[in-house]
Amino acid sequence: MDPAEHDALAVREQLFHERVRECIICTLLFASLYVLCHFVITHFKKHTDFAEVHDDEDAAVNRIALGLCTFTLAVSLGAVLLLPFSIVSNEVLLSFPHNYYIQWLNGSLVHGLWNLVFLFSNLSLVFLMPFAYFFTESEGFAGSKKGIMARVYETSVVLLLLTLLVLGMVWVALAIVDNDAASRESLYALWEYYLPYLYSCISLFGVLLLLLCTPFGLSTMFTVTGKLLVKPRLLEDLDEQLSCTRFEEASVSRRISSGKASCWLNLDVELLREQLLAIQSKRRTLELRRRASPWQRNLGYPLAMLCLLALTGISVLIVCFHVLELLLDDAAMPRGIQDAALGQVSFSILGSFGAALQVILIFYLMLSSVVGFYSSPLFTRLLPRRQDTPLTKIIGNCVSLLVLSSALPVFSRTLGITRFDLLGDFGRFNWLGNFYIVFLYNMVFAALTTLCLVKKVTWAVQAELIRALGLHKLPLPVTRSRPLRERC
């Protein structure tokens, strides 16, 4: 064998081994996410939908739908971890460029993960989740033999009709927006133009949903933290408050047990029971605060609130700085690249510390968006409950989380949270190159987040000061709607 042929064979063999290694790593990562998501779904699913189904056909349908939901949730978690994994990989390669044990961590692996997440996101959002919903609702065509295949046929037909309807609507929208010969010819290129445009619209919807949910979630997280953690004692006597609450609870209990109404009091037992529950809840809260250690009371709550305040403030500062960059430099616009050049330069001016801060901010914004999503009045009903979530609600939660998580890389890059450019098809969205959309998006996020932050912090500080100083016990001034002479 010639030396040239030997070298070419060695190169092909090396490429083959690298491809096999990447497939094994991707399979192991996704299998780990799948197992984790399976435990999460089984923690929230309703037992009557799966464990207590006596019909074998319904049980098989539920198991198939459960598997599709688990797959979709695993893809959502992979989309959340995609950008942090890429940033950490780049910093690891920068710190250990010649380490033998991390040579598997390269740009080809990261680029392959981005492509797989994009492909599975499209597959789950367009086909798997609609199939799971229609499959659970199907019963087979009238007159056909009952069974799993009858449900599969009905679901396939309904999904095909829905696909044709959605694609037809997108086709009409594209024909109206781009009314030229080149655009009309490109409408027939299903894979190259049609589906990317459809997912671009879905991604834009997901990014707008993140824009609306994240500031609301930041405000909600301040409230939830104040309720879960024990607040410090500031000019207040817990023993006196606890004693008064116990006396009040005993008084209401005696009224309920007596069941007699006095001549001047119209006794409402239901109202008194609700009042008793509220007093008992207040008493348990006071007892918890009394039993809390000084470290937990004086250090936990202030540190948690300071961390939330610092992360929110840093996010707003980064977005404001990115707005200035958009006005001065076109390179600040989000763009996509085809090759992931990892291990060459850090994506943060602060080095490894800045990269770690970017990862923390990405997780923080994702957490706040999920909290804001489930706290909003429109989506409160989707909130899963432990061992009491039906299958249709699980499907709705998986679809919602997939939309939010798949838009997270675009969301982070559009706001300038990270400098890591979008890989693969994530950078092919049409609206990413529109300066006005990107600029307006950054301005709206900065304005909403600043408004929620200032409003929440100032109101919280004002309420704590009023409560600590005892001003909330003062009688409010009575204002008359009309003079007493007119009433007489």
Image: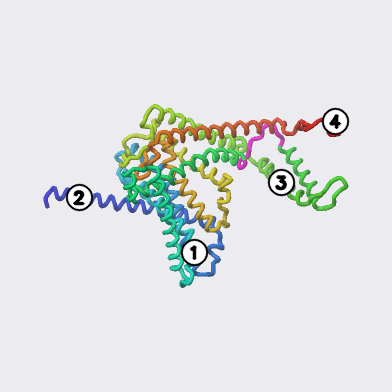
Residue 102 in sight from this viewpoint: no
Residue 371 position by quadrant = top right
Say what secondary structure mark 2 lies in.
helix
Q: Name the residue under label 4.
A: 485
Disc 4 residue type (three-letter): Arg
Q: Nearer the viewer, residue 284 or 198?
A: 198
3D distance between C-alphas at marks 2 and 3: 75 Å
Say what secondary structure mark 1 lies in.
loop
Residue 43 in magenta stretch: no
Residue 232 in magenta stretch: yes
Disc 3 residue type (three-letter): Ala
Q: Name the residue under label 2.
A: 10
3D distance between C-alphas at marks 2 and 1: 54 Å
The magenta stretch is 227-237
Q: Mark 3 points at which residue?
A: 278
Mark 1 vs mark 3: which is more N-terminal? 1
> Which percent across, then down, holds residue 118?
38, 48
Mark 2 vs mark 4: which is more N-terminal? 2
Image quarter where the C terminus lies is top right
